[in-house]
Amino acid sequence: MVNKIIILLFSISVSTCCLAQKTEIFEAKKSLKDNKDLDKAELTMRKVVALPEQKEKDRLSNYALLADIVKKRYENYNESLYLKQLKDTSAMFSSLCNMIDTFESLDSIDAMPDKKGRVQLRFRKKTSEYLSPFRKNLIRGAQYYIAGKKYNEAYKCLDTYLDCHKQPLFANFDFDKTDTVAPKAAYLAIYCAYKEKNYAGVAKYETKALTCKKKASYALMILYKCYSEQNNMEQAVEYLKKGFNNHSENTFFFPRLIDYYATINQLDTVQVVVEKALEMEPGNLFYRLAKNTLQLNQGKYDDCIALGDSIIHSNDKIAEAYFNVGSSYFNKALLRSKQGKESREKRNEVNAYYEQALPYVEKFRQLRPKQQKKWIPLLYTIYFNLNMGEKFEEIDNLAKSAGIK
């Protein structure tokens, strides 16, 4: 008797649930027909399609109704835009993403085989032909959001646009071969993802982004930053090398590449990179200065002086060249002071090097007055050894006030 009561109550519950569901579906259909309360109708149908107790046929028809409601919402936004009555442009682009996502879900349900393993596509052809012309509006949406610095929303538009490439719904269009905008969309996608530190979003489209020829160097810059921020220096440096090899005109890659190798004390690799740069652009002052700095670090002081003077002759405003030459003469003085016994001849040679270093270091001070840690120690030693009393006193006071020994 108890079991019969439980079964009866269960049957009543199911019947009540089915009746409520039918009522909700009826109300949603009425909203679609009247073109009213579509937001509410969408929420209702999303709740309905999420219910597990549905027949396959009912699930498909319910999802088709949901898709039609979402479609109608987007068409309303489009019409308002055409009539110049749309107040919230953002809502239109969000609605477009929603519409495409919903129809893709409908297609996946439509493509499910029946009990006999048969697949009967009822909606794909008509749906894909309807949606395809609207895809370009996703690019406009992304540009709209980027202009407003809403990078998450922009990424959603671009992700929806690019995801169509792998959706069976759009297979007949063969977007991988016909979509010429995809490389630029992928570049914009990694740009937006990086802005929000969405590293997974960057990785998703990094390969495609690099096929955008006009933006390839910028894509490499983003990818370097992305991987270096994740402490994946192996991959980050690979992108630096690609940038340096393929886009030598962009000054972003070269200094970071040699700084990286210098940091891990691979000066031989630094030299290889510098020499390769000069092979590509022998007259490039930036590359020549990098070689000049390397010569100083390697202790090739005579070579450093010769190249530094040549750079200064080409451009007398390059402060680092003055520092390199001055430091070379200074270091030659230090080396000579450590050689042999003390003598008048030795002292004269040491002071001669300091005298040669002096104008270069003073010029560097003039051009880079804020870089006190670089020029104060040099001038302190030079003025002291050359007995330049007033200047030594001035630099001594500067050293004390700056806390530089």
Image (cartoon, helix red, strand yellow):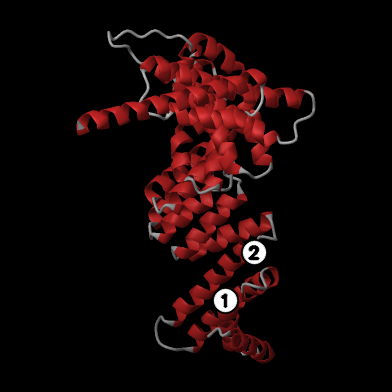
Q: Is residue 170 left or right of residue 356?
A: left
Q: Is residue 58 left or right of residue 81?
A: left
Image: 276 above or below 404? above
User: Which residue is rendered at x = 60% and y = 27% of the image?
Assistant: 96
Residue 248 makes an appearance in the image: no
Q: Nearer the viewer, mark 2 or mark 1?
A: 1
Which amino acid, by three-letter code, is at mark 2? Ala
Q: 355 or 318, which lies in front?
A: 318
State the CA–CA distance, disc 2 to disc 1. 15 Å
Which amino acid, by three-letter code, is at mark 1? Lys
Q: Secondary structure at mark 2?
A: helix
User: Which residue is rendered at x = 62% and y = 61% of the image?
Assistant: 309
Disc sitting over residue 204 in the figure: none
Q: Which residue is mark 2?
A: 319
Image: 403 above or below 220? below
* Crowding near the residue tagged with mark 2, few <14, some 14–19, many ≥20 C-alpha atoms within 10 Å: some
Image: 196 above or below 144? below
For residue 19, what is the image quadrant? top left
- In the rendered image, residue 162, in percent from the top left (x then y), is placed at 51, 27
Could you tell me if the residues under marks 2 and 1 are in contact, i.e. CB atoms within 8 Å? no
User: Which residue is rendered at x = 21% and y = 34% of the image?
Assistant: 2
- In the rendered image, residue 75, in percent from the top left (x then y), is placed at 66, 21
For residue 130, what is the image quadrant? top right
- In the rendered image, residue 387, in percent from the top left (x then y), is placed at 62, 90
Image: 402 above or below 27? below
Dot 2 or dot 1, earlier in sequence: 2
Q: Secondary structure at mark 1?
A: helix
Q: 330 or 380, which lies in front?
A: 380
Q: 226 or 129, which lies in front?
A: 129
Q: Which residue is mark 1?
A: 373
